Image: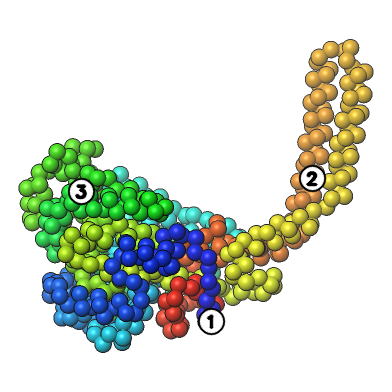
Amino acid sequence: MELEVLSLQEKNKVMQAYNDDKDFLHTFFDYENQESSYPERLKELASRIYERRQLAEMIHSFMEPFGISEKANKHIVELSEDAVAIVGGQQAGILTGPLYSIHKAITVILLAKKQRQALGVPVIPVFWVAGEDHDLNEINHVYTEIDGRQVKSQYREKFVLKLMASDAVYDKEQMASFVKNIFADFGETAYTKNVLDEVLSAVERETTFTNFFVRLMNGLFEEEGLLFIDSAFKPLRELEADYFGQFIAESETIAQLIFDKEKRFAQLGFGDPMGVEIDAANLFYVHETGRVLLSRENGYFVNGSTGIQFSKADMHRIAKDEPWLLSNNVATRPLMQDMVLPVLAFVGGPGEIAYWALLKEAFHHLGMKMPIIVPRMSMTLITPQVKRALESKSFTVGDVMSGKVDAARKQFIESLHEKRIDLILDETREMLNIQYKKIAGLVEKQGGKMQGLLDKNLHNHSKQLNYMKEKSEEALLLKHNATLRAFGLLEGELFPEGGLQERVYTPYTYFNGYGPTLISDLLELPFEMDGTHKIIYL
């Protein structure tokens, strides 16, 4: 395994500003992403009080069914005492979702190790699973690469209600069949049986999307002691009860602060990532029909589609007695995370960082500062087959991502084009037109029926000439199929549909080809969190 770095041109305007514009950073965030921020943040966390014992017990309770490694247990004990956390999170995708879920976890782990050494205090890695999310269409599919094409396979089971991922129970037989079909697309290798058996075991042992995700992730990172929290876990909701009460009491102010910040964000040309409504309650209610969003109307917390209407007193009673019926949205989740956990730094992707940029004043209103925000590391994995294709065509990974391969493929196809055949076919078409015009002049007096027959006959000849042209081109492409497959492989693997590999493919594509040591080998590489794109040759 070899590591290279690549400086990609940052296309995301928010990330450009976050990395390069100090005014932007200080307007929307509390800390700069640099080493000097960590002692300052640590000092701030020391002044705050956390329900550490209850927090540690909750994490232990959640993780126990999946297995708690010795290192994870040590981290839980440290959290119950004085540890701080590096936190990242993700939705509970099938087969862990896209590669960036793994990249995010790796970033969290490596940053926790680095800051533990730098600060001389326990710093633990935590992965916050967004099990409360109910948009199952965002997590119910897997992409594979077949002949240079990005192919989407979707788990087809229908869920009528807006169930949270942690409540959505899948059909085990159907999920097992789905997973087997995905692995069939990967192709058979020396590692396939063991890797597939491990995944099928997780399918059988679990029942929900969230637990299936956590069992796989915990297995991949157990030696690193990565801790997991499910945002929909009932004991976590109980721990959050008082904080829900604060959100309810301050709902109007929080909504106004976020609304104003997003307006400022949009004025600076960064768009409106949350689409904030001034009457937003920024909380969901877990109704019998599923998870429904609340808004404020005439002093009440309401949801129009279900007819739900709660007074503020009702909401406070729910928060106190049945907090598991409440759920955070994209605005309150970061706030809740910081209230529950001593978050030294949060690791996020570009979309998450855009959301966080709107929350500075809301954090301050609740008596907190935002944690240090660290962009997750971005990586592309290069298989031996792809490496050979790069070398055979004298391309670099940068060439693929800049579009040079696409241009080269088009140029190659153009060079294959047999212009002599086109010329002869065009000449034949022109001769036919001339001859049919002569025939048309001779049959003109025989009426429209004969003319129609003549037009139809000419049209058939034209179709045959087009058919001959298409078949000639197909024969040429077939003759040079190996070269064209190399072009397709490079784009399909490294820059599928014009985007980064990590946003599309599951890591199990690479476990299947590389083997089960992929994660541990990646963690041994000398990564620097310097904003460069990491190229890893497997």
Residue type (three-letter) at the residue carrying disc 2: Lys
Within-10-Å neighbours for mark 2: few <14, some 14–19, many 20+: some
Q: Residue 469 carries which label?
A: 2
**Which labelled disc corresponds to residue 281?**
3
10 Å neighbourhood of mark 1: few (<14), some, or many (≥20)?
few
Q: Picture coordinates of residue 313 (x, y %)? A: 6, 48
Residue drawn at 16 percent across, 64 percent down: 367
Could you tell me which secondary element the residue under label 3 belongs to?
A: strand
Residue occupied by mark 1: 2
Q: Does residue 80 appear anywhere in the picture?
A: yes
| Image color mode | rainbow
Left or right of 3 in this view: 200? left
Q: Which one is earlier in the sequence, the residue at label 1 or at label 3?
A: 1
Of labels 2 and 1, earlier in sequence is: 1
User: Quadrant location of residue 14?
Assistant: bottom left
Whether residue 292 is visible to the viewer of this picture, yes or no, is no
Q: Is residue 103 above or below residue 441?
A: below
Q: Which mark is residue 63?
A: none
Q: In this view, does 400 lie to the left or right of 322?
A: right
Q: Do the residues labelled 2 and 1 touch (CB within 8 Å)?
A: no
* Count of number-bearing discs: 3
Measured as percent of width and height from the top left, residue 487 is found at 66, 63
SS under mark 2: helix
Quadrant for residue 32, please give it.
Answer: bottom left
